[in-house]
Image (spheres, rainbow, N blue to C red):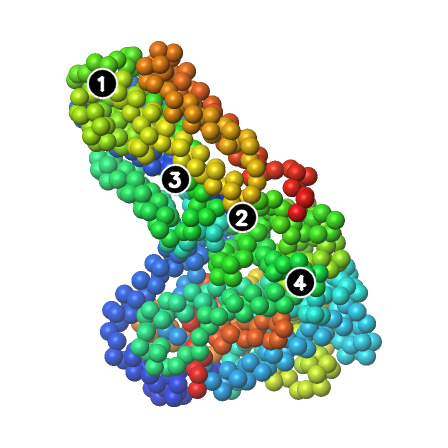
Amino acid sequence: MLSRVADSLYWMSRYLERAEHTARLLDVDMQLRLDQSPLEGSARWLRLLEASQVPVPDGGKIDAATLTHILTLDRANSSSILSCVAAARENLRQVREQCSTEMWEQLNRLYLQVNSTTSSEAWLLHSYLFFRAVQDGAHLFQGVTDSTMSHGEGWQYIQLGRFVERTDALARLIGTHFTHLPYPTDQAVESEEYLEWVGLLKSCAAFEAYCKTYTAELRPMRVAEFLLLNPDFPHSVRFSVERVNAALDAIGELTERKAAQPSRLAGRMRATLSFSQIEEILASGSIAYVDSIRWQCSQAHDAIHQIYFDYPVESALVA
Amino acid sequence: MVYDEMFAAPGVPRPHYQALFQTLLELPPEELRKSQQAADLSFLHQGITFTVYGNDEGTERVFPNDLLPRIIPNNEWRKIENGLTQRIAALNLFLEDIYHQGRILADGIVPRELVYSCRHFRREMRGLAVPRGIYVSICGTDLVRVPDGSFAVLEDNLRVPSGVSYMLANRKVLKRVFPTLFHDYGVCPVDHYAQALLATLRALSPPSSAARHEPTVVLLTPGVFNSAYFEHTFLAQQMGIELVEGRDLLVHDNVVYMRTTSGLRRVDVIYRRVDDDYLDPLCFRRGSGLGVPGLFNAYRAGNVALANAIGTGVADDKAIYTYVPAIIHYYLGEDPILANVQTYLLSDKSQRSYVLEHMDQLVVKAVGESGGYGMLIGPHSTKEQREEFRQKIKAEPRNYIAQPTLGLSRAPCFLDGEVQARHVDLRPYILYGENVTLVPGGLTRVALRQGSLIVNSSQGGGSKDTWVLRA
């Protein structure tokens, strides 16, 4: 597979995952907003911007309409939903002969839908429909991808991109949450704080899965454990890292290249998560822990880039 | 008067259009409108678009597709096929000759200065042997039907002809819209084009590659902003070959490699959709990032084949075009099966003065342009435009030719909810590898504006499916 193609598939997948993630965050925020006083809402919006790596506007104040605009349809913001879907489509367009026709058509349809949306008051009122559509569109694309594309090397780069992005986004979201909310205890929480923790779970599509595992009694420490360390839930950090690892292994075999560096980094990250206990993590500093996950994640990204996408010619002239 | 593809006389369809005529009478326009909408949407969702230059970069438009097929009886197609096979054979011999001995120039059949002054003549190709002696492997020739009902060649596209993907996409849509009609008509299939193209490209692979492995064929595209990018991806996918950009390739010791995730892989044949000028910044236009530095040396060393070869543009120069009948006669000893359109050479003094006096009746074209750019349609032009071209011609007569305004034939189209006649041409695609292959059909281009004679996609043209009948 061409290095450029692998690179495009990887980034296409990352951008789409990012768009889906942002749509979910905003969807959840809309629901929470209704139950809260404007003051609490505004604090969360600033966290939302921080978690999406968008600079907070001057004065540190923001209202719901501006926030929604910046994160959805703002072309100037490179991580708005529109920008991400457009970037995903542009990446796929450059390698469209590598994906199935169904994949291209699905992503193109999603793009046309997002691109034809204009911001208005009426739209804002029903923007949950838009967020649903983006999430559904992304899910549909993943389903179409899994059932129409060969699960070969290209597919593995798509997996890799999706789970690298997910690991990073989850770690960032959890980190922001830990920074701004009281220390997660093993006590059930109530009312206001309760809403925030539900919000965090729902932002990771994890509320129902959490309840199945731990019942509806919400203890922050368990929430942290679930989102960081649960091995089975697709939006936990550990699950995502496992997938990154699996994709790297598969790529290593398919390309017959001994890629020591990315595998070592991903393997270490996986080991950290497999053998950690939530009590330890909290005791030794939860923020530092998620930061270190994010750092390792970016290291793995760089290593992948150097081994597969942009290697020096001299290193490959044997063939 | 122009030739009407459908009607022999008002209200009397030609025999091969009878069934379509009947269907149109019976089908409610609403049905057709729905099919048209479904087809348009399917084109948009598939991203079958082209890019319009001169607008903001990357303006994508759907190439308009017309639902009504253009039907060509088998006997007419046979003649086209024979005529184009003859033409591509002669043009290849011509290219080989002018880049080697130059016999046709020495014999005074084609003026030497006309060849050497052509912008697309490549000195670098002198004495360079190309695989199988084939310069043009992929050719798209524009045919028009003149008022007496015969086909004539309007121009040869010997560099990087495009549009074949629309031929295939149109066919796919029409099979869905008119399944019964299609079946009853007995239409020759076109779906094997990609396979034929791959076989043609493989036939060019350097002998050195045979011992190693199956030849590696790639399609070189200028990238996603090129107007024909959709077609590049489509063909690469249909052939199952890699679609590469210049930055994916590199040359080491005169061997071309592509950069893959498993390391470097050797490339044997490049179906390049990049113009000569941009192929190799070391040899042609400097500072171009679209090509591959060192590619020409690898080509010269015989380590890689290019399709089409470099320098083929000299043979589709519109001034050389006037000599093609003589070229056919010179190399093959045959009369041309397909006629040329009457053409005035503006480097000739008496022809030039005639043209300058009759510019309001003629079409003036720049010799090296394509895509409907750089032309003047006399009857539809303003005084200022004519004056502008008059000055251009006087400055560089070699750069222009003139032709009578052609009465392109008309075919029925479904536009704005009703059937209307529009002018059409025909571009069949000719492949030349081990032997010459024509997929029966081609791209019928339509001038969508009423009365317009310009069929180019960049100038408001559309296309329709072309049905060549089995019998």
Which chain is home to disc 3?
A
Looking at the rendered structure, the kind of residue marked 2 is Met
Looking at the rendered structure, the kind of residue marked 1 is Arg
| Residue at 38% in and 48% down | A145
Label 1, on which residue? A219
**Residue contact between numbered discs 1 and 4, judged by CB atoms under 8 Å:** no
Label 4, on which residue? B210
- Dot 3 or dot 2: first in sequence order is 2
- Dot 3 or dot 1: first in sequence order is 3
- The answer to whether marks 4 and 3 sit on the same chain is no
Could you tell me which secondary element the residue under label 2 belongs to? Answer: loop
**Residue contact between numbered discs 4 and 3, judged by CB atoms under 8 Å:** no
Label 3, on which residue? A16
**In the depicted structure, whether residue A51 falls above or below residue B63:** above
Q: Quadrant of residue B119?
A: bottom right
Residue A306: give its label.
none
Which of A227/B458 is in front?
A227
| Residue at 55% in and 85% down | B79
Give me the C-alpha separation between circle 3 and circle 2. 22 Å
Which chain is home to disc 1?
A
Give me the C-alpha separation between circle 1 and circle 2. 47 Å
Which chain is home to disc 2?
A
Give me the C-alpha separation between circle 4 and circle 3. 43 Å
